[in-house]
Amino acid sequence: MALKERSPETPKTSSKNPRVPLRSIDTYAAQCDKCLKWRVIATEEEYEEIRSKMEENPFVCDRKPGVSCDDPADIDYNATRTWVIDRPGIPKTPEGFKRSLVLRRDFSKMDAYYITPTGKKLRTRNEIAAFIEANPKYKEVNLSDFNFTSPKVMEDTIPDDAVRKISSSGNGNKKKASKEAST
């Protein structure tokens, strides 16, 4: 998965919502198990299907119609955008719900939460259990289909000017850190 691409034309912040430009996922991609090229996946739903079965059915280029390992990569892994890598085997989001990922301002990690069909944001498994209990029409939804594991933010794709937590003392001091200082 990759977050929005950074370019001179794309402002890094917006007066309405400073989180949108760099912290929303705009491209879903899967890496071919054979040639290791990245292939853009058309929809979040298709991406979730691939991710949920990655361990037993690794992604290969020829799963995309008209594509083979001989074709150039759809997207290159580089620092023109911030990349986050999901763990394989995370289940598909139950129908009617939406899994949402938000990148923290310091680029340290993404927070995962779920939006219910009624629009409520749920941040924990306990909140999901309470929602299902309070809404019997969702009793068929399996609690194990909700996974709060967040994707790994790839350090080598974080913008040079990102404000990062670099204090190991845990006091929360934030400093502007270059990639060299944070490795």
Image (spheres, rainbow, N blue to C red):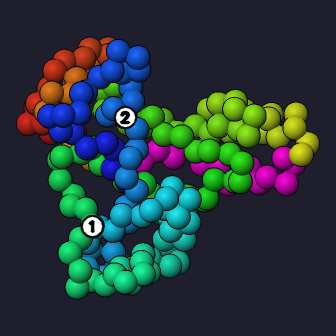
Picture quarter containing residue 163?
top left
Name the spot of residue 68 as percent of width and height, x first. Answer: 31, 84
Is 27 left, or right, of 8 in this rendering?
Answer: right
Name the spot of residue 46 as percent of width and height, x first. Answer: 53, 64
Residue receiving disc 2 = 23
Residue 86 visible? The answer is yes
The amino acid marked with disc number 2 is Arg
Identified at 71% across, 38% down, the residue is 116
As drawn, the label of residue 74 is 1
SS of the residue under disc 1: loop
Q: Nearer the viewer, residue 92 or 13?
A: 13
- Work out whether mark 2 precedes mark 1 in sequence or the reverse, and give the earlier one: 2
Question: Magenta stretch mostly in which secondary structure?
Answer: loop
Q: Nearer the viewer, residue 38 or 170?
A: 38
Residue 124 visible? The answer is no
In the picture, the quarter occupied by the C terminus is top left
Q: Which residues are magenta?
A: 138-151
Identified at 82% across, 40% down, the residue is 132
Q: How many marks?
A: 2
- Discs 2, 1 touching: Cβ within 8 Å: no
Marks 2/1: CA distance? 22 Å
